[in-house]
Image: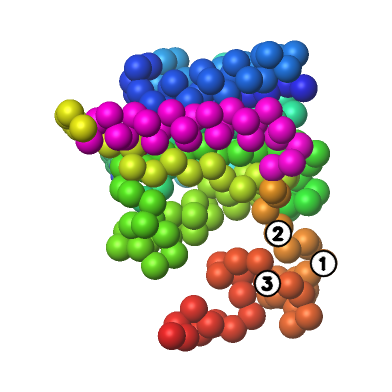
Amino acid sequence: MNVLIITAHPEADSFNSYLAAKAARVFEKQGSVVNSVNLYSENFEPVEGKIFYPDRQDSVRFDALREQRHHWEKKILPDDVSRHIQLLINSDLLLLHFPFWWFGMPAILKGWMDRVFVYGGIYDSRQRHENGVMKGKRALLSVTAGAPENACGYNGRHGDMRLMLWSPIHALHYIGYSMLEPYLIHGVRGGLDGIAKKEQQKLLDEKVEDFENRLTNIHEWPIIPFNREDDFNEDKTLKPEAPEYSPFVRHDPDGWKKS
Ligand SMILES: Cc1cc2nc3c(=O)[nH]c(=O)nc-3n(C[C@H](O)[C@H](O)[C@H](O)COP(=O)(O)O)c2cc1C
């Protein structure tokens, strides 16, 4: 198996980077080929814009989708984007390691998606969801949060972290990935001293061990169900008889308001 591990953390000595290295070792031990990329280490430029498109189809008005497709077709995308696309295409499993920052992905990772998931190449209106370019590949988010588990749960003070990850999960599924249930590690806090630090270390050690065990048996990892194209009407709304898998695509618009 070919595994691609993308880490979005600015510190090599962080828990996120440690976890990514552990994951790499698990797969290497099993004989997989692992490519590890830290977006910060390679100074990945996450801000999509005109600067990346030297041969514009429209030199007056910048249309990112149009220029992405044009530069893909002419094979003149920036080197970093071409290299990352190749890494994605060559891998069977993608792991994204990142800390939860302001209830979502760090900007560098969002920008990586903006630039690397190129319209006309990685997706278009005919190639998406279960017909996506990445069909047959799996992806897993491994996310750490500073807040404790209770605070990130369905009734927690900070809101349901699992639901907040819908955006990257949906984006990856949109380009064809089968999405594994994300691995969340809570209570990863800096600045601790004494007993608090020791207690955190113990919990994190247990989590790392659990993560390694689960990666070793990745074929057993639960896959997130999504609606298929034929669950939707011509007008793109969910058919009444179609299953409902998430509060983001639902039958009852007010269902989430019921108490
Ligand atoms: C800019 C920033 C935003 C953060 N936002 C959140 C947040 O929304 N929820 C949360 O639980 N923790 C938040 N944290 C804490 C990080 O999630 C936590 O420090 C990180 O997961 C710890 O992993 P590390 O040791 O690998 O950095 C934030 C930290 C930073 C620096």
The label shown at residue 244 is 3
Nearest the eye: 28 or 208: 208
* Residue type at tag 3: Glu
The label shown at residue 136 is none
The N terminus is located in which quarter?
Answer: top right
Beta carbon at label 2 within 8 Å of ligand 1: no
Q: Which residue is mark 1?
A: 230
Nearest the eye: 13 or 94: 13
Q: Which residues are magenta?
A: 196-221
Magenta region, main secondary structure: helix
Quadrant position of residue 44: top left
Of tags 1 and 3, the one toward the viewer is: 3
- Which residue is at 44% across, 64% downward? 154
In space, the residues marked 2 and 3 are separated at their CA atoms by: 8 Å
Nearest the eye: 228 or 185: 185
In space, the residues marked 1 and 3 are separated at their CA atoms by: 13 Å
* Residue type at tag 1: Asp
- Which residue is at 74% across, 41% downward? 220
Secondary element under disc 2, as helix, strand or loop, is: loop
The C terminus is located in which quarter?
Answer: bottom left
- How far from the left and from the top, in percent, is residue 249? 61, 69
* Mark 2, other Cα within 10 Å: few <14 / some 14–19 / many ≥20: some
Beta carbon at label 1 within 8 Å of ligand 1: no
Vertical order, 10 against 122 (above or below): above
Q: Which residue is mark 2?
A: 226
CB within 8 Å, label 2 to label 3: no
Secondary element under disc 1, as helix, strand or loop, is: helix
Vertical order, 248 against 168 (above or below): below
Residue 72 seen from this side? no
In space, the residues marked 2 and 1 are separated at their CA atoms by: 11 Å
Residue 106 is covered by the magenta coloring: no
